[in-house]
Amino acid sequence: MTDSPALPSVNREWHLVTRPVGWPKPEDFALVEAEVPTPGDGQVLVRNLYVSVDPYMRGRMSAAKSYAAPYELGKPMLGGAVGEVVASHAEGIAVGDHVLHFSGWREYAAVDAKNAVKVDPDAAPLSTYLGVLGMTGLTAYAGLLRTASFKEGDSVFVSGAAGAVGSQVGQIAKLKGASRVIGSAGSDEKVKLLLDEYGFDAAFNYKNGPVSEQLRAAAPDGVDVYFDNVGGDHLEAAIGSLNLNGRIAICGAISVYNNTEPAPGPKNLARLIQTRGRIEGFLVGDHYDLQPKFVEEVGPWVRNGELKYRETVVEGIENNLEAFLGVLRGDNTGKMIVKL
């Protein structure tokens, strides 16, 4: 076993204390002081440096059956994190190494070494392993290239396009030879970012008018691929503009995550018969076989500046919850990160 000296005795961690109904409220959560855990055999103790907050976490706060187990009440919540190893009971991981793992929402975590992935802080900033080079980036890559079967010359529409996933989808499509990339976002500032920094061909603020009308104006020749992060009126608009043999990849539906009643489905699904269109949902966990190819292809784009990314960084474990609520509100540009 190897240890760093002078570890603190108190570990702050966020617990879910009540399952939210509708929008999560601060009283549904508690920032709890606990002992710093002692790693067992085959484990490492990690001092988290950056933790991730993501829209999918809202689903885990419900007891409803889903693709991920619900958070347990009165227990630390889970999420992506990257940190420094301060004690090790495991072969192959030493004190001072940096690892990616899924025991976020806390300052210190005892992690099974088999569930920790070593990352290189000299190859890229540590925070990028939670975003552009991490699960977020792989989600964009797999959803566009595998689920939506993107091919050179396609016209691509991305909703939530200024977010962590959407911004990468649009840029990867451009780098792969899309004929036109259109994005929607929730502010004029974000629309400007899509056009000026991320290289989208067209973009619109969905708050400025009906999505279907704005999409038709931005993509008069229709779209071949729609990457859906929003659901609702965006999905209906995309179906309305879908070209023959168009494909829709369903990544998320943040517009309905806090609804207390089921949201109505698109009213124009019959149009898929005319277009021979396809809608397919996906989870990034089903596509980890693409990780080596993803890093090989996307890593150089990030390093040489061809693929740009933004991070919204919130400081302090005490602000972890507010950062998460900010993601649900759309406050972030790019990946939302909490720096501890």
Image (cartoon, helix red, strand yellow):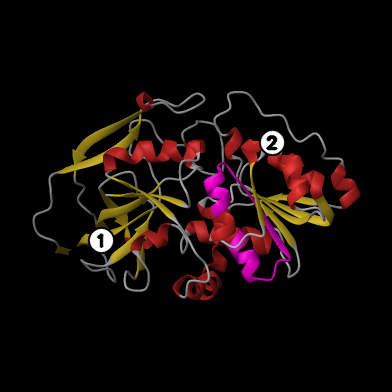
Q: Residue at x 60, y 36 (%)?
A: 255
Residue 162 % position (x, y)? 54, 51
Q: Residue at x 54, y 69 (%)?
A: 294
Name the residue furthest left: 6
Is residue 189 magenta-colored?
Answer: yes
Is residue 151 magenta-colored?
Answer: no
Asked whether 18 or 208 is in front, the reply is 208
**Residue 330 is at least partly visible in this image:** yes
Residue 267 % position (x, y)? 80, 34
Looking at marks 1 and 2 on the same chain, the residue that comes earlier in the sequence is marked by 1
Instruction: Assign a secondary structure to mark 2.
Output: loop
**Residue 286 is at least partly visible in this image:** no
Q: Is residue 111 left or right of residue 96?
A: right
Q: 7 above or below 117?
A: above
- How far apart are the two marked residues, 1 and 2, measured between alpha carbons? 47 Å
How crowded pointer 1 is (Cα within 10 Å; few <14, some 14-19, many 20+) is rated as many
Kindly identify which numbered label has been placed on residue 209: 2
Q: Is residue 169 left or right of residue 55?
A: right
Asked which quadrant contains residue 266, the reply is top right
Q: Is residue 83 left or right of residue 305?
A: left
Q: 120 above or below 78?
A: below
Asked whether 206 or 316 is in front, the reply is 206
Quadrant the N terminus occupies? bottom left
Instruction: Assign a secondary structure to mark 1.
Output: strand
Q: Would you name the residue on which mark 1 appears?
A: 84
Q: Mark 1 belongs to which amino acid?
A: Glu
Q: 125 above or below 109?
A: below
Nearest to viewer (mark 1 / mark 2): 2
Q: Residue at x 79, y 45 (%)?
A: 239
Q: Mark 2 belongs to which amino acid?
A: Gly
Magenta range: 170-192
Name the residue furthest right: 274
